[in-house]
């Protein structure tokens, strides 16, 4: 087990390096000059000024040298300097990470817990009223685009009922609001993002549960005369939840995409917002920093998921 | 000597296919949600094909009516901030969504099946490399990555299809691989191996048919997912600017949430209903093709 974990850890290093190089190459292959975005304010900007900017950010050097500089800086924990925000990328991202993480973690947690419970109940009683109800929630939630769901939540709870704020943290933060304000401004975004998670997890848990309950070893357990609850909870449950572990781990990356959209709808000042602004302004260092932070956290999460999976399921032998 | 034998075999499997289709339909028909979903999809396909006939105005023509007019007999879904007819936009938007959804799903399923079956069957370094590759694709969250590529390389409809298709294969690949990992140790595969059956034959004739229900269901889900991704890109203003799409309408509607509910309710509702129908059809296919469920039906 320990050998497996350390081997996977070692494998993650070249994977992360590859991700960095791919990100770098793609962003630099794209058309558009970052310098022109940096000096876009001044129409009559002199050529010397443009060149000095280019030099200051190392954009005049060959791409290989830029890549070398970039990798060296990343290893030192320096992610560069943002053209647009005029501050260090590491600092900028560091400021926003907790805001996005709060949203993503709360949604993932709520969505997974509710989803597993719904899925297991539905799988145990297929085609019952409860299953129909659960399937409806799961299927509806899975089909709703997160941003439209967010818009509808705003329409109902903020515009018509006027019980919750439309916006995210800034209202609470600027007004010096307490925990209550933060909690209130979290409810709608977490419902939007977590609802999408819930749908996927409930659906997969139900499908696994159904499949397991139809398998031979369950028939054997039943024919031994075991009670239905012993069959379900002692024999079927663990095997049914097992693949969900992978789904939750894989869902982290998906949540980040959803978070970007959710943040746009609810004016949530997290990573998604700076991602969008730096995309429009071709702010390479910020984009790069964001992709690095997000990619690396997803690789680590996948690693943890794999290890957890190997620990939970002794049938799977890793060579 | 061999010829008549082969002929007889083919004839037999032909009858089997027909009976299979009949059985599929009778099981599919039992799932009312799936049948309803299929009906909705037919309506969406119809409106995509006959968009020009159904809609009252060209979808992008401004000032066909007053600005932000609430739904009425003249404008059944109201008008937007430039006085464009929302109904015409919703009808034309179905073209973009269906096209992108189906094309992107086919791309991702084909790629995913190829990678997943090879990785799952052969294991070892092939499996390692493919899974690391799929991790690489997954570590770049596909929505963000699609956004980056589309913003940087242009947002034509084909770019959007290719990007979504290329980024979506890991899901199918992992599902297929997991099924292969599970099945390659099973008795019928071991028996086939013991009989000296070639790897290709085992993959395509023994294991892959057992993953068909997963592929079909994943495929229909991917259509829905691709529609949602495209809508998300357009919602952020990164879709094809020359096309009227549901996501782009929602992008415009975001600023008018407080004053014009119809502006966001109808285009978003169209995405929701279409994806919902797609998923229900997928569910129906799952129920109709998964033989293990027979047990549940008979109970």
Image: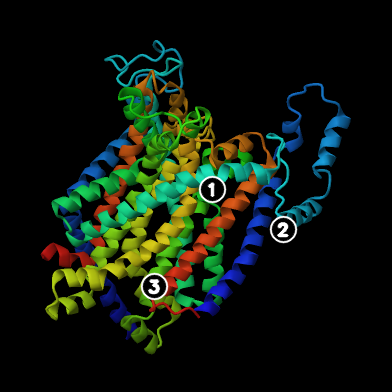
Whether residue A127 can be seen here: yes
Q: Position of residue A137 (x, y in %)?
A: 26, 46
Asked where in the image residue B180 lies, by quadrant, the reply is bottom left
> Which is in the foreground here, disc 1 or disc 3?
3
Q: Chain of mark 3?
A: A
Q: Is residue A162 positioned above or below A149 on the image? A: above
How far, Cα to Cα, is label 3 from label 2? Answer: 34 Å
Residue located beneath label 3 in the image: A312
Residue located beneath label 2 in the image: A75
1 and 2 marks in contact (CB < 8 Å): no
Image quadrant in which the N terminus of chain B is located: bottom left
Q: Is residue B83 positioned above or below A289 on the image? A: above
Image quadrant in which the C terminus of chain B is located: bottom left
Pick the front one: A113 or A126:
A113
Q: Chain of mark 1?
A: B
Q: Is residue A153 positioned above or below A233 on the image? A: above
* Dot 3 crowding, Cα within 10 Å, few <14, some 14–19, many 20+: some
SS assignment at label 2: helix
The colour scheme used to paint the residues is rainbow
Q: Position of residue B124 (x, y in %)?
A: 52, 78
How far, Cα to Cα, is label 1 from label 2? Answer: 30 Å
Residue located beneath label 1 in the image: B163
Q: Chain of mark 2?
A: A
Q: Position of residue B153 (x, y in %)?
A: 62, 41
SS assignment at label 1: helix
Closer to the chain start, of discs 3 and 2, is: 2
Give a yes or no on whether discs 3 and 2 share a subunit.
yes
């Amino acid at each position: 087990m320990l050998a497996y974990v350390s081997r996977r850890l070692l494998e993650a290093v070249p994977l992360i390096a590859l991700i960095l190089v791919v990100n770098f190459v793609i962003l630099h292959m794209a058309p558009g000059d970052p310098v022109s975005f940096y000096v876009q304010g001044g129409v009559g900007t002199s050529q010397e000024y443009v060149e000095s900017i280019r030099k200051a950010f190392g954009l005049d050097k060959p791409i290989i040298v830029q890549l070398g500089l970039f990798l060296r800086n990343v290893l030192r924990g320096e992610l560069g300097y943002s053209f647009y925000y005029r501050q260090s990328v590491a600092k900028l991202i560091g400021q926003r990470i907790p805001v996005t993480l709060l949203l993503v973690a709360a949604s993932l947690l709520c969505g997974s817990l509710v989803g597993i419970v719904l899925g297991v109940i539905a799988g145990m009683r297929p085609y019952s009223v409860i299953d129909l109800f659960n399937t409806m929630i799961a299927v509806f939630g899975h089909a709703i685009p997160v941003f439209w769901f967010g818009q509808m939540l705003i329409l109902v709870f903020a515009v018509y009922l006027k019980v919750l704020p439309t916006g995210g943290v800034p209202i609470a933060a600027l007004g010096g609001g307490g925990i209550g304000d933060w909690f209130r401004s979290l409810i709608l975004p977490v419902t939007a993002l977590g609802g999408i998670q819930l749908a996927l997890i409930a659906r997969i848990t139900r499908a696994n549960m159904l499949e397991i309950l139809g398998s031979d070893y369950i028939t054997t357990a039943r024919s031994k005369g075991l009670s239905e609850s012993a069959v379900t909870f002692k024999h079927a449950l663990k095997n049914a939840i097992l693949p969900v572990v992978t789904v939750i781990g894989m869902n982290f990356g998906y949540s980040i995409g959803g978070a970007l959209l959710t943040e746009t709808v609810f004016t949530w000042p997290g990573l998604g917002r700076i991602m969008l602004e730096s995309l429009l302004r071709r702010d390479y260092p910020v984009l790069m920093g964001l992709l690095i932070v997000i990619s690396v956290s997803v690789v680590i999460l996948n690693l943890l998921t794999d290890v957890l999976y190997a620990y939970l399921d002794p049938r799977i032998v890793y060579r | 000597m061999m010829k008549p034998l082969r002929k007889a075999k083919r004839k037999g499997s032909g009858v089997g296919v027909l009976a299979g289709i009949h059985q599929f339909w009778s099981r599919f028909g039992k799932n009312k949600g799936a049948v309803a979903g299929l009906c909705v999809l037919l309506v969406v396909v119809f409106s995509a094909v006959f968009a020009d006939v159904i809609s009252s105005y060209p979808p992008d023509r401004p000032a066909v009516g007053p600005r932000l007019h609430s739904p009425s007999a003249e404008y059944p879904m109201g008008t937007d901030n430039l006085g464009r007819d929302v109904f015409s936009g919703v009808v034309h938007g179905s073209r973009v969504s269906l096209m992108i959804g189906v094309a992107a799903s086919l791309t991702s399923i084909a790629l995913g099946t190829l990678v997943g079956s090879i990785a799952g069957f052969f294991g070892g370094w092939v499996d390692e490399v493919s899974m690391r590759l799929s991790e690489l694709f997954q570590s770049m969250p596909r929505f963000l990555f699609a956004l980056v590529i589309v913003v940087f390389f242009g947002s034509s409809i084909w770019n959007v299809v290719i990007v979504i298709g290329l980024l979506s294969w890991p899901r199918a690949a992992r599902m297929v691989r997991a099924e292969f990992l599970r099945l390659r140790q099973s008795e019928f595969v071991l028996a086939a191996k013991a009989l000296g059956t070639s790897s290709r034959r085992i993959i395509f004739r023994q294991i892959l048919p057992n993953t068909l229900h997963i592929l079909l269901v994943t495929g229909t889900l991917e259509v829905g997912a691709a529609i949602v991704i495209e809508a998300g890109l357009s919602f952020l203003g990164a879709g094809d600017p020359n096309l009227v799409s549901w996501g782009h309408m929602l992008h415009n509607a975001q600023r008018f949430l407080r004053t014009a509910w119809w502006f966001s309710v109808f285009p978003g509702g169209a995405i929701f209903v279409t994806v919902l129908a797609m998923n229900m059809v997928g569910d129906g296919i799952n129920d109709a093709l998964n033989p293990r469920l027979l047990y549940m039906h008979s109970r």
